[in-house]
Amino acid sequence: MLSYTLREWEALPHGEGNGCIPSHLAARLVALAKTSPFAGRGGSGVLEDRRHELRARGVVGVLAAEGCGLEILPKIDVAPEEGPERQNAAIRKRLVHMLAVALDLKIETGRITELDWQRETLLEILIRIFCDKLTEAVRRGMPRRYIAHEDDISTLRGALDVPRQFTRHAANPGQLACRFDELSEDIALNRILKAAIAHLSRMSRNAANQQRLRELAFVYADITDVPAPALKWDDVVIDRTNRAWQELLGMARLFLCNRYQTTSSGSGQGTALLFEMNSLFEEYIGRLVSRALAGTELRVSLQGGREYCLTARDDGRRVFQTKPDILIWRGGEVVQVIDTKWKRISSQIEDPKQGVSQADVYQMMAYAHLYKASRLTLLYPHHSELFGAEGCQAQFWITGQQTALETASIDVAVGREEEIVSRLRTKILVGSIVPAAFGI
């Protein structure tokens, strides 16, 4: 099976020759990409099919079609002196970190060697982590719960179902209509994990991962097969008896139905695990900001506010609801609005507008009017072409108001989670907001 790796907005030539993907394989990947909800109306939201090349867009992940696979990685700046394989390995690590934070997963990657990060795709890395965690968990015993049963047997078990006994067995007292609870492993949680194993078995192309998945499928052989769309996620109850399975449930959700990605399959088309980077970056930053301000007088709401821009004159109906990415409150007052954008801005030296879209500025002006915040921040990923360090890149006043609008950047390529949280606190959440909370 041929495998290719691209980064966002890069192109892969198709046709004949070295470095090209055969045209018939390119057509399979394009057809698969068009099945994704991220494809958009024109079908090019994941892969743009140009005349002689495929161009990746702002969606990352893995597309696996018959005979080929394509991995799309985010455009994150890593050490330029390293070769492409080591750079891709570093990007995979950062993407797994972002997924772990955004989806509230505790993903340990210590067992994965540097060679594994270079050699395997993002999908195979995630499958390996899932298999390792699930193998360790089942060795300690599969979760079980009591399930209510009704059965007609010759000896009393549990309680007698009197109405059923006298309607069904009035003439046959040798049979007792019983109701009882039975401790069982065939529960919603295990059915979800079995569905994840089956799904990943169809996606994985790595021999070691396939072997791990076969072994796990054998362990779950007695669990009922349930198609992914019919899984009963709401029936899963996580309590102190099965707390250790919470992370595995989160990973199963990641593979089967998470809102940041889609897994799709069709008649011979293949499978995909895709993430829309703008949404992922938004959730990632939102969770880190919440941790940065934990224990202070400030409160964070994600996708909150929901104020309306307009009110109809005739019936008072409100329209055009707003959903700012991050609102920071002190008491009942919004003191900062942060809107995240997974795109590259320019240095103010090169472009006074920094490539910021006019629509984004209008959006922030609407937030200033609706939420009365004194500070508005457009937050972008930092990159090497910006002069200077991460943090505030430019500051403006909204005309006629005492409201500041700033562009800022955060480097997601370096540092552990706690380090990035600290940098967010000191470089993005500084100024009129943080001093009272942190004594700065």
Image: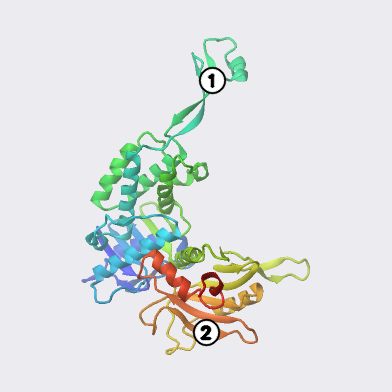
Is 150 situated above or below 24?
above
For residue 420, what is the image quadrant?
Answer: bottom left
> In the rendered structure, are the residues bearing label 1 and label 2 in contact, judged by CB atoms less than 8 Å apart?
no
Viewer-nearest of discs 1 and 2: 2
Q: Is residue 203 visible?
A: no
Identify the secondary structure beneath mark 1.
Answer: strand
Colour convention: rainbow
- Please name the amino acid that badge 1 sits on: Cys
Q: Earlier in the sequence, mark 1 or mark 2?
A: 1
Label 1 Cα neighbours within 10 Å, binned few <14 / some 14-19 / many ≥20:
many
For residue 43, what is the image quadrant?
Answer: bottom left
Direction from residue 404 to residue 12 in the image, left or right: left
* Residue found at x 35% / y 67%: 73
Direction from residue 192 to residue 305 in the image, left or right: right
Residue 56 screen position, x and y as percent: 37, 70
Residue 67: which disc? none
- Please name the amino acid that badge 2 sits on: Gln
Question: Farthest front residue?
Answer: 439
The quadrant in which the N terminus is found is: bottom left
* Residue found at x 43% / y 83%: 346
Residue 213 screen position, x and y as percent: 30, 45
Identify the secondary structure beneath mark 2.
Answer: strand
Residue 178: which disc? 1
Q: Can residue 221 be seen in this view?
A: yes
Is 144 situated above or below 6?
above
Residue 153 screen position, x and y as percent: 49, 16
Residue 394 screen position, x and y as percent: 49, 84
Is 71 situated above or below 82?
above
**Residue position marked by numbered label 2 in the rendering:** 395
